[in-house]
Image: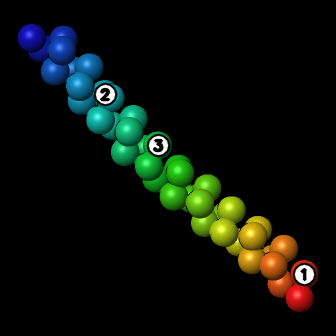
Amino acid sequence: MTKTRAILILAATMLLAACNTMQGFGKDLESAGKTVSDAAK
């Protein structure tokens, strides 16, 4: 049971880290899109 609990905690930690990384990636992508949009005007 403790091995299962450890795996669940590890998976939850990795998911939270991935969300943080994806949020940063989304901001970078948004910034790049805005630059392209401004260049097209």
Secondary structure of the residue carrying tag 1 is helix
Say above or below: 22 vs 35.
above
Q: Residue at x 84, y 74 (%)?
A: 36
Q: Residue furthest right?
A: 40
Say above or below: 9 vs 5.
below
Colour style of the rendered protein structure:
rainbow
Q: Residues within 10 Å of mark 2 (few under 14, many from 20)?
A: few
Q: In the image, what residue type sits under mark 3? A: Ala
- State if disc 1 and disc 3 touch (CB < 8 Å): no
Q: Position of residue 9 (x, y in %)?
A: 24, 30
Q: Which residue is mark 1?
A: 40
Secondary structure of the residue carrying tag 3 is helix
Mark with earlier residue (2, 1): 2
- State if disc 1 and disc 2 touch (CB < 8 Å): no
Q: Which residue is mark 3?
A: 18
Q: Which residue is mark 2?
A: 10
Mark with earlier residue (3, 1): 3
Task: Locate residue 16: give its quadrant.
Answer: top left
Q: Position of residue 17 (x, y in %)?
A: 43, 44
